[in-house]
């Protein structure tokens, strides 16, 4: 049930579109929580609305206020994500939620700056105001739901002499191009997120954040997270950021700082490519190791920043492209920090890399927003030389594959793959705008119950999986819902 529904018309960038501003009903407040009136007043500068499968959330103010607004506006969604994350991680990592809370307190929290501690605690306060029981360690664990099970846990297993349960996955297909490769010479960037559909169906928040310090941010994320985590966004300095993870990465430094904290800090404070590199390298813990694709809308320069634990490199150009599909780029990092097999042409990362190279060559001088949308929805399998989607297409649907993705410990027919996509160019970046498509732009809707009936081996996901509908490409802009208020 939804309450507080107003019809409206959005007008931005010359485009008119209908929408509805929606607020979830507020559960009874917990003991010690502010009154409904006081909580609403504290959240007053924030707002949310739903459009084409996305929830757009505007937050502004000091760190604690941004956090409170976040928790207050997205309380039902955060509550739901915590509900499914706990049994999902127990099944996939063989660690219970108490383990994740302990890591949050003893390993992660000491490395987080006071600004983001205040924001996390603010989320907890906002949740309490809407009757959701969660605390600081729940929220820190939620923010680290990728770097702890996929990086810290394998490291810990190795320290304890135990066979590893998990391994660093490969998620996402992304590119950035500039100069002679694009239609008008400006930067074009695209990214689609790959993950399990348990989380992917919920990865549908667009945040417009106006912090007290640093730059305004427009990014996608999961509810409850202070960073994008699939990492697609732009800030008020025109810094465009995305990434793809490095398959089979091994290594973690528990004395370092959490990756999600550094990623948010870079998105908020970077004014140049050098700033992104500096912030991400500072006290790097090796968690969620990525190939970062970065653009500077002010200069037209792009970069590929590969960040491992022991190895990191930066390649830059004003005339070229970089692509990511979860393969490590540099031979030294591949050899020293991964178990990745670059010779296996049929693996998901290598097949998608080959497809990226085909598309870049075919579209040199013609890459623009519409081409980027087509790339991120591309379903061609270069190994079987046919239309997919499969685990080897840029937009993937692994639940259709009898092979699964063994490099990520995804068994045959695993319910995972592309869950949403985003694109922008540097002109959009300067206006803090992006295009986004919820769900799978290559495969249509995913329906949970029919899938579970066909694949009973995943019956443990019943109640965790939910339908994931595919929506149209939708344009979002910072502050856009001010016209709807």
Image: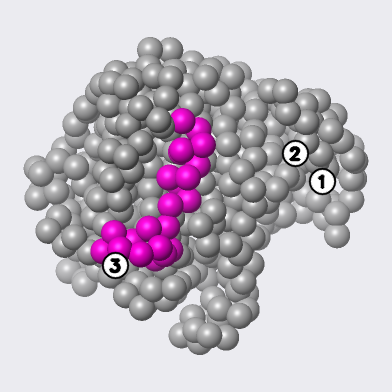
Residues at discs 3 and 2 in contact (Cβ within 8 Å): no
Q: Which secondary structure, mark 3?
A: loop
Residue wearing tag 3: 384
Closest to the observer: 251 or 402?
402
Residue at image x 64%, y 60%? 469
Q: Nearer the viewer, mark 3 or mark 2?
A: 3
Queried whether the magenta region covers residue 479, the answer comes back as no
The reply to whether the C-beta atoms of the residues labelled 2 and 1 are less than 8 Å apart is yes
Identify the mark nearer the N-term, 1 or 3.
1
Q: Quadrant of residue 165?
A: bottom left
Q: How far apart are marks 1 and 3 (CA)?
A: 47 Å
Circle nearer the N terminus (3, 2):
2
The circle drawn on residue 23 is: 1
Q: Residue at x 55, y 35 (%)?
A: 219
The picture places residue 400, in percent across and down from the top left corner, at 44, 73
Where, by quadrant of the figure, is residue 89 drawn?
A: bottom left
């Amino acid at each position: 049930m939804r309450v507080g529904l107003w019809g409206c018309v959005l007008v931005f960038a010359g485009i008119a579109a209908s929408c509805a501003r929606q607020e979830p009903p507020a559960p009874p407040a917990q003991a010690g929580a502010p009154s409904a009136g006081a909580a609403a007043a504290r959240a007053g500068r924030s707002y949310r609305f739903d459009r084409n499968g996305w929830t757009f959330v505007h937050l502004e103010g000091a760190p604690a206020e941004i956090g409170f607004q976040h928790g207050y506006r997205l309380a039902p969604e955060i509550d739901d994500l915590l509900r499914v994350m706990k049994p999902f991680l127990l099944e996939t990592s063989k660690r219970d939620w108490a383990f994740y809370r302990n890591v949050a307190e003893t390993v992660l929290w000491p490395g987080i700056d006071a600004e983001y501690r205040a924001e996390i605690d603010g989320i907890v306060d906002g949740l309490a105001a809407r009757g959701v029981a969660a605390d600081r360690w729940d929220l820190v664990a939620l923010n680290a739901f990728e770097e702890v099970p996929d990086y810290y846990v394998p490291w810990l297993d190795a320290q304890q002499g135990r066979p590893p349960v998990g391994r660093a996955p490969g998620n996402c297909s992304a590119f950035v191009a500039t100069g002679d490769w694009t239609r008008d010479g400006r930067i074009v960037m695209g990214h689609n997120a790959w993950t399990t559909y348990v989380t992917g169906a919920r990865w549908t928040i667009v945040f417009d954040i106006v912090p007290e310090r640093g730059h305004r941010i427009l990014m996608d994320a999961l509810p409850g997270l202070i960073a994008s985590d699939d990492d697609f966004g732009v800030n008020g300095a025109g810094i465009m950021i995305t990434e793809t993870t490095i398959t089979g990465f091994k290594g973690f430094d528990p004395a370092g700082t959490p990756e999600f904290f550094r990623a948010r800090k870079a998105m908020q404070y970077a004014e140049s490519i050098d700033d992104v590199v500096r912030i991400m390298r500072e006290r790097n813990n090796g968690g969620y190791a990525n190939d970062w694709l970065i653009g500077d809308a002010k200069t037209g320069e792009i970069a590929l920043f590969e960040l491992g634990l022991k190895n990191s490199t930066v390649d830059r150009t004003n005339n070229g492209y970089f692509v990511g599909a979860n393969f490590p780029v540099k031979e030294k990092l591949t050899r020293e920090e991964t178990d990745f097999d670059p010779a296996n042409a049929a693996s998901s990362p290598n097949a998608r890399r080959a497809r990226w190279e085909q598309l870049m060559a075919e579209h040199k001088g013609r890459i623009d927003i519409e081409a980027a949308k087509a790339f991120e929805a591309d379903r061609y399998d270069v190994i079987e030389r046919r239309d997919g989607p499969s685990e080897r297409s840029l937009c993937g649907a692994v639940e259709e594959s009898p092979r699964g993705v063994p490099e990520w410990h995804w068994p045959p027919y695993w319910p995972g793959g592309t869950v949403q996509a985003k694109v922008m160019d540097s002109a959009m970046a300067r206006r803090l705008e992006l295009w986004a498509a919820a769900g799978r732009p290559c495969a249509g809707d995913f329906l949970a119950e029919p899938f579970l009936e066909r694949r009973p081996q995943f019956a443990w996901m019943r109640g965790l999986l939910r339908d994931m509908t595919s929506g149209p490409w939708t344009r979002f802009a910072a502050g856009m819902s001010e016209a709807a208020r």
